[in-house]
Image (cartoon, rainbow, N blue to C red):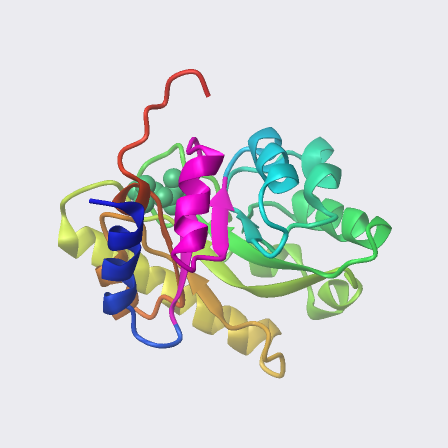
Amino acid sequence: MTIEYNLNKIRSLLPSGVQLVAVSKTKSNEEILEAYRAGQRIFGENKVQELVRKWELLPKDIEWHFIGHLQSNKVKLIAPFIAMVHSVDSDKILKTINEEGGKAGRIIPCLLQFHIASEESKFGFLPGSFGQMFSSSELDKLKHVVISGVMGMATYTDDVVQVNKEFSTLREIFGKLKKDFFQDNDRFSEISMGMSGDYLLAIENGSTMIRVGSTIFGERSNIGI
Ligand SMILES: *Cc1c(COP(=O)(O)O)cnc(C)c1O
């Protein structure tokens, strides 16, 4: 199957209001261009150096989304161009993105990543912890980020009941944050959840952004990257 075929298939299943982030990590510029020529403009990457190389060489109307764990010292490399950071997983990184956004003269859309999976390795705020870290007035001081919603990754499992529960937890977290912090803020509107194996279930649970890689580009070989 071609990349174009795969993209069109996924698009045909998306309700309006759900955006597709094509996760292109480890994939070549040629493969990304194939998706681009099929009309895809939003791409997701999880390594800063790899992203910067791709951004330099690929068309400038691509919207790059960062979806991996971000280290503070690397924020400055992506701050000038990144369209959204999905993976804000600490107060420290949020403040750093705000600082670097300021230096770049930008306001950077950010999603708060929550740990909803049962696996230990996944990053993110614990449900409930964000409210203890920030008050509304502290958030108001961050002028160079706009907190646009939440992101989460479900457990990698065939257990549909479990994945469903995790997605619905993320939606509840979104609702609670909206009520506590962002009631009058229209920009707090995104729930980034759903990958190749579970995006339909994520959409049923209210996802507004799915992040799909291998179903579009084929399996990744994780060697030498
Ligand atoms: C790799 C990755 C994806 C895409 O995974 P696929 O299973 O290939 O669709 C989505 N989100 C994050 C955070 C990722 O790292």
**Residue visible at 59% across and 49% down?**
59
Who's the residue at 58% across and 81% down the image? 183
Is 216 in front, or is 166?
216
Picture quarter containing residue 11? bottom left
Identify which residue is drawn at 79% across, 64% down: 143
Q: Is residue 23 magenta?
A: yes
What segment carries the magenta color? 18-45
Residue 142 as seen in the image, left or right of residue 153: right
Q: Residue 97: percent from the left, percent from the top? A: 72, 48
**Residue 199 horizontal/vertical position (percent):** 27, 57
Q: Is residue 47 left or right of residue 13?
A: right
Would you say 151 lies left or right of 220 here? right
The vertical placement of 45 against 134, above or below, is above
Q: Position of residue 96 (x, y in %)?
A: 74, 45
Q: Nearer the viewer, residue 91 or 105?
A: 105
In this rendered view, identify the residue nearer to me: 46 or 88.
46
User: Image height check: is 14 above or below 94?
Assistant: below
Residue 22 part of the magenta segment: yes
Q: Quadrant of ligand 1?
A: top left
Q: Quadrant of residue 175?
A: bottom left
Instruction: Report x, y in % for residue 20.
Output: 39, 60
Quadrant housing the N terminus:
top left
User: In terms of depth relative to the viewer, which is nearer, 34 or 109?
Assistant: 34
Please count the marks in the image: 0
Farthest-out residue, top? 224
Could you tell me which residue is drawn at 32 percent across and 24 percent down? 221
